[in-house]
Amino acid sequence: MALSKLSNLYRQVIMDHAKHPHNNQPLPQADHEIELRNPTCGDVLTVQLKIQDDKIIDVAYTGTGCTISQASASMMTDQIKGKTTAEVEKMVLGFSDMVLGKEVPDMERLLGEAAILQSVAQFPARIKCATLAWKAAYQAIEESENDD
């Protein structure tokens, strides 16, 4: 597939997640909730997790923000649901490395559809947008581990 067609496909997937986000609603049964802000862009996201036996039983987010932050949050919720907290922590660190332009072994397997956000590395101003939801999930997991 030509690079321009591939780039167009990636843009379409990102736009679809931004316009039709997955898991974008309050999660009343959440155990942990973290709100983070990106003051440079105005993004505000609240990530809510339901954790049971070190596993993400359910996840949702609410908030407002740019296309990248909304698409990334949507993809993140799809990818972490059903994973262990240790798996999610590894995913968050891998995602962060990926958008910083670092090599991430087995990236597609680790991050699933969210791996398409790799191109954010070309736009340093958008890195905080892309990582906001992932950082919130990480902090919520850290909070849950401290509660134990």
Image: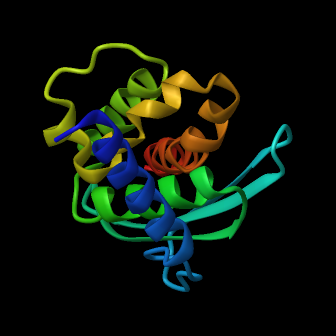
Seen at 51% across and 59% down, the residue is 71
| Residue nearer the viewer, 60 or 11 | 11
Q: Is residue 18 above or below residue 103?
A: below
User: Is any atom of residue 45 visible in this view?
Assistant: yes
Residue located farthest toward the bottom when viewing the structure as drawn? 28
Residue 2 relative to residue 43: left or right? left
How many numbered discs?
Answer: 0
Residue 3 x %, y %:
29, 34
Question: Which residue corresponds to the image point at 38% horizontal and 60% vertical from the top-left?
Answer: 13
Q: Residue 70: x, y in percent?
A: 58, 61
**In-front residue for pair 52/98:** 98
Q: Is residue 74 above or below residue 147?
A: below
Residue 26 image offset from top left, x and y in percent: 59, 82
The residue depicted at 41 percent of the width and 61 percent of the height is 12
- Image quadrant assignment for residue 132: top right
Q: Left of 70 or right of it: where is 66? A: right
The residue that appears at 51% across and 75% down in the rendered structure is 30
Q: Which coloring applies here?
A: rainbow
**Residue 66 found in image quarter:** bottom right
Q: Is residue 49 visible?
A: no
Q: Along the line of sight, which residue is nearer the eye, 22 or 1?
A: 1
Q: Position of residue 1 (x, y in %)?
A: 16, 41
Outermost residue, top direction?
Answer: 102
Residue 20 sits above or below residue 41 on the image:
below
